[in-house]
Image (spheres, rainbow, N blue to C red):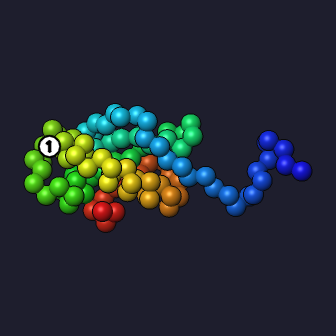
């Protein structure tokens, strides 16, 4: 009999990622745009590198405003890519780079 504190299937892993937080910011140290996704109540940090943003929007301005604009213009693709990377296994944070796009 299954009880609420036990897992029904020890191999089952729920990796449903949502993006209710619209916030994003430029991280000068990483030269990337940081944003957050959630798996239930667990917050996960993602970084999209400037090079990755240049790959998906080649004409972007390579400054903070340009990178944030490129992020906003390609939000659906970036979130879908983040979900795929997240499904590969849980980590402290996730870097989305050129190879992911």
Tally of numbered discs = 1
Asked if residue 41 is positioned above or below residue 47 in the image, the reply reads: above
From this viewpoint, which residue is outermost toward the right? 1
Percent across and percent down for residue 80 are 39, 54
Q: Residue visible at 17% across and 55% down?
A: 57
Residue 24 visible from this viewpoint: yes
- Mark 1, residue position: 66
Of the pair 28 and 68, the residue shown nearer to us: 68
Percent across and percent down for residue 62 are 12, 48
Q: Which of the image's four quarters has the C terminus?
A: bottom left
Considering the numbered disc 1 on the image, is that residue within a helix, a strand or a loop?
Answer: helix
From this viewpoint, which residue is outermost toward the front? 76
Q: Quadrant of residue 81?
A: bottom left
Residue 32 visible from this viewpoint: no
Residue 88 vs residue 66: left or right? Answer: right
Percent across and percent down for residue 8 are 78, 53
Asked if residue 14 is positioned above or below residue 24 in the image, the reply reads: below
Q: Residue visible at 30% across and 47% down?
A: 75
Residue 67 vs residue 47: left or right? Answer: left
Q: Quadrant of residue 41?
A: top right
Of the pair 74 and 7, the residue shown nearer to us: 74
Percent across and percent down for residue 59 are 10, 54
Residue 13 vs residue 96: left or right? Answer: right
From this viewpoint, which residue is outermost toward the bottom? 99
Residue 9 vs residue 22: left or right? Answer: right
Q: Residues within 10 Å of mark 1 (few under 14, many from 20)?
A: some
Q: Quadrant of residue 40?
A: top right
């Amino acid at each position: 009999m299954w009880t609420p504190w036990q897992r029904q299937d020890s191999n089952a892993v729920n990796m449903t990622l949502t993006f209710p937080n619209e916030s994003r910011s430029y991280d000068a140290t990483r030269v990337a745009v940081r944003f957050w996704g959630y798996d239930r109540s667990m917050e996960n940090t993602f970084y999209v590198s400037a090079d990755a943003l240049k790959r998906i929007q080649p004409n972007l301005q390579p400054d903070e405003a340009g990178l944030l604009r490129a992020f906003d213009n390609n939000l659906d693709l970036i979130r879908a890519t983040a979900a795929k990377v997240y499904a590969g296994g849980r980590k402290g944070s996730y870097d989305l780079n050129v190879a992911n796009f």
